[in-house]
Image (cartoon, coloured by chain):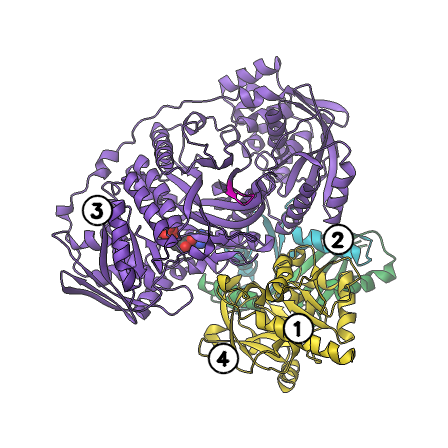
Chain colours: A green, B cyan, C yellow, D purple
Amino acid sequence: MKARIHVFLKEGVLDPQGKAVSSALQTLGFGEVSSVRQGKFFDIETAPLPKEEREARLREYCKKLLANPIIENFKVEVVEP
Amino acid sequence: MKARIHVFLKEGVLDPQGKAVSSALQTLGFGEVSSVRQGKFFDIETAPLPKEEREARLREYCKKLLANPIIENFKVEVVEP
Amino acid sequence: MRLSVIEFPGSNCDHDAYEWPLRVFGRAPQRVWYTDRDLRKADLVIIPGGFSYGDYLRCGAMAARSPVMEEVVAHAKRGGYVLGICNGFQILCEAGLLPGALLRNRTLTFLCQEVILRCETADAPFTASLKKGDLLRMPIAHGDGNYYCDEKTLRRLLDDSRVAFRYVSPDGRVDDGWNFNGSMDAIAGIVSGNRRVLGMMPHPERASEALLGSTDGAAILRGAASTIEARKKVQHG
Amino acid sequence: MVEPKVTPELALAHGLNADEWARLRDILGRVPTYPELGIFSVMWSEHCSYKSSRIHLKKFPTSGPLVLQGPGENAGVVDIGDGWAVCFKMESHNHPSYIEPYQGAATGVGGILRDVFTMGARPVANLNALAFGQPSHPKTPHLVKGVVAGIGDYGNCIGVPTVGGQVCFHACYDGNILVNAFTLGLLRAGKIFRGYASGAGNPVFYVGSKTGRDGIHGATMASAEFSEETEQKRPTVQVGDPFTEKLLLEACLELMERDAIVGIQDMGAAGLTSSSFEMAGRAGSGIRMELDRVPMRETGMTPYEVLLSESQERMLIVAKSGAEEAVKKIFAKWGLDAVVIGEVTDTGRAEIYWRGDKVVDMPVAPVSDQAPVYDRPQAQPEGLEERRRLDLQAIADCRDPEEALLRLMGSPNLCSRRWVYTQYDQSVRTNTVFGPGYDAALVRIKGTKKAVALSLDVNPRYCHLDPFEGARHAVAEAARNVACTGAKPLAITDCLNFGNPERPGVMWEFARSVEGLSSACRELDTPVVSGNVSFYNETNGEGIFPTPAVGMVGLLDDVEERVQSFFENEGDAVVLLGRTRGHLGGSEYLALIHGLESGTPPPLDIAREKVLIGLLQLLARKRLVHSMHDCSEGGLLVAIAECCLRPRGGDLGVSISLQARGKRLDGLLFGEDASRAVVSCAPGSLQKIFNLARESGLEATSIGAVISKRLELLVDGQPMASLSLEELRTRWEAGFPAVASRV
Ligand SMILES: Nc1ncnc2c1ncn2[C@@H]1O[C@H](COP(=O)(O)OP(=O)(O)O)[C@@H](O)[C@H]1O
Ligand SMILES: [Mg+2]
């Protein structure tokens, strides 16, 4: 299976990188930019998994490793079975 | 406008993080994982822009700042006008 | 007192942590490899600094999930003593032994420089040989030392005076200009609820020798040692 | 993929000229296969063969009683006593860093680290010499940020402290920045490992990261034959993986504890090709390899690509037969590949197979021995005489020394490098006695009383005005910096950064520089034990200034005799050692204040320099001084100001009184006369210092005293400057951030 997982900072957790990016964009002349939040994503390939297990397994990856629940949320999607 | 930009390493460029993540997942018991590539994404909010300009502008952000053309590719998408 | 220093792939202050007790009171710790499940009867486990797993994904994330950490968590739950320095602090947070997380420095760069720490509580094994308000000089060397936790957690840390050290100015004031990495409330180190687990970003093991510019770091190890020895005496009558 | 047909045109595209093409056909007695062509092209490239520089480098003094390994190996080794030795080298990563500053600089550090630990040494100190274009150039801030972050992140992750270096800015680097990385390692004097593939039948191990299409020879890729495949197969920029390098380092050092290794070498430039050919070449043996056993990261790789890949964090090890299991076990512990890909033979040939077919069959020796050697034409560059002329009459003397000092202290070339080195871990491994900010770094050797002192130096403007003298100045300043800690200069490594050697002007500058380094090193008894040449630092005909960076290593026998670079106590006396003539040619002052880069560099009398260096060591040994600081770029007043600004706070002021004796004020204050140092001492030690100076035949002048808050300057009794330390520090600290954080 091919899957993509997004991991992003929770609301309210300050995002130094995002802040820096948005002010950099503004100084580069893109005044329209009002806010930037930066996150990570993972493109994952696995051996085939039974349909009903796929998403659960991806969430497992996040809980066990990919996301830190104290500061991050995540979203999983199966791209191709 | 709300937009999301994905920035990821070009094919063939070594991804040390992805490599480490995939072997970590395997040792955590997820033997089915065969490969992981890690990327960045940016959720960007801007003042409204004329429809025809939006994507071009996002690509500008990437060329000027968000992506390193030597080793990275990017994909822009407008999430909500 | 028995000490063990945990070694992860990518630890690079393991050597310094190993020599630290040797230098401070001539006692050699045991080395424990990350796949090991035996802490060698350690009273005090030191998790050294460095770049375990290259700091890939999140600092300390992968190390926190390695076999040896299950033993360290069990050790702590049994009331054992644990000291996490720099990457060790990040690992303790990732492993859930200490609350909060360490975000990217607000400068978005690695920062290596001498800082001034103020002891915020003498009521913990690691600060037992200090007085509240004492100032210590030692280096920081990290890219992700920007302490963060949610409001509720912060209040709990403050109410239980679990903040061990803050970054301060040379005259001992909390001052944003001296909180280089931008830590919440200038927090440089915190202790666990039972006060026996300390995580701190600065490097006391690099500040325990006059030749290197400061001996202030030795106090932290001495404090732990005296507390542990005293406790053992009580136990063994 | 179908391999292109090998033709003279393809050889040309590989950078081989007609003679070289003829020569390689003689060696083979036939037209080479495509992989063989690749091998010749990299082995005979300037980078690997030193074909333009070799005949000049022969002039270097490379031996001495303490030299355990001179040039020719992966790094040089010098004996420091007590059974210990230091291994060090400097290497350039200029072009890659210009293309991708972060990864280019990072992989530069990775490469030099491997050069050092492949010798059996534990890396204990990194330094770096950087040169960027003008601060106002649009690319400069991006390059500065990327390079510094790349150097920092790699060294920090590995756990090797970065303890010093140099940064300069000049328009000549606008299109060609310089990134020179230096590493020093520590090893047992009796346990040096070398790149020897000897003992027929011994297994050849490939260890470390998998091989991808990283950094494969640009020219070859440009050749027509690749067509549609080219896009996806384009050589990819090398990405550093410091975590894997750390594992590789530990695994190699652990293996070296066993008696399992015959020879070992890292796969640097030209990867598997150069490591295998050089190792077999040194041992005069042959080698047989099966390329399809090489661990690969990408699919569809060809033998050509596997041979030429420059993927990072890989080593080639020739093990003792029978030790195979030991090797595999240790690398497995560190989670790294360790695969036998072949064996040493006695045929003197390289026989390389791919899926059973022999794709390479060539003699090893000729590829290195018969590599072309060129004595390229030289001619003094036009305009040299012109720029060496300087008419001081036409230049008004300095009227406001205070303002001039502040401008100099805040200028990109003299301001504090703090912004740079706070991004480097300076203290990991707990050996750093003096880190960045001091005249030279001082790294103690645990288990002994000793410490090594390290300094990187070169003044490109001096070299531009006089390559011979400029090179001598580089050696002299580096030695002086080292001696200012009390240490004795032992040996140097160098990194020779120049333009296109096919231009006679550049070749002339190169030859003069090598002669300058040689003469200075001879006179100071500091042999050249390793080094690196980087040519073609040039964009559209515009070459860089000649930039022969010198890395000096010195030894302090008793670390308790160390002397630091900053004023220590109020009330101490301040003494100037050496003679002030007021030489302004080539000075930072003329360049910054008058926009003039003309004249000749200050005259350098190495005999006097040697006396000064000896005196500095003597003052340290007799514990007569509290600080010693060398006087170089910016001249006397800048040197004095630097002594006031203490790295750990508590700045101290100074009150200075000078006699002009008819000299111009700017020359007196900002002239860069060589062989001078500013020392401070307890007033009670003054007489002893004067006596020692007189005995050694060197001028020593009492010029003032350390005070609390200000820098006060009198010249011939007239007040010339009175500055608060706050103002001085603010200007000095603001300089670098102003350059780096410009967007
Ligand atoms: N790229 C760098 N990395 C680390 N330290 C540096 C770097 N550049 C300069 N430094 C440090 O800043 C100080 C000033 O450098 P420099 O002006 O070259 O000293 P000097 O003139 O005495 O050789 C030195 O201590 C040097 O080690
Ligand atoms: Mg210098």
Q: What is the distance, in whole Å, between disc 2 and disc 4 at their CAs?
A: 43 Å
Query: Percent from the top left, x then y, of residue A66?
Result: 72, 62
Q: Please state the extent of the stretch shown in magenta in the rendering.
A: D79-86
As drawn, B37 above or below C160: above
Same chain assignment for discs 2 and 4: no
Q: Write down the residue under mark 1.
A: C225
Q: What is the distance, in whole Å, between disc 2 and disc 1 at their CAs?
A: 38 Å
Label 2: state its secondary structure.
Answer: helix
Q: Is residue D702 left or right of residue D208?
A: left
Query: Percent from the top left, x then y, of residue C102?
Result: 62, 69
Depth order, front residue of A5/D76: D76
Query: Percent from the top left, x then y, of residue B37?
Result: 69, 53
What is the number of the mark on residue D583?
Answer: 3
Give the amino acid at mark 2: Ser
Q: Chain of mark 2?
A: B
Q: Quadrant of residue D544?
A: top left
What is the number of the mark on residue C174?
Answer: 4
Q: Write down the residue under mark 2.
A: B23
Give the amino acid at mark 4: Val
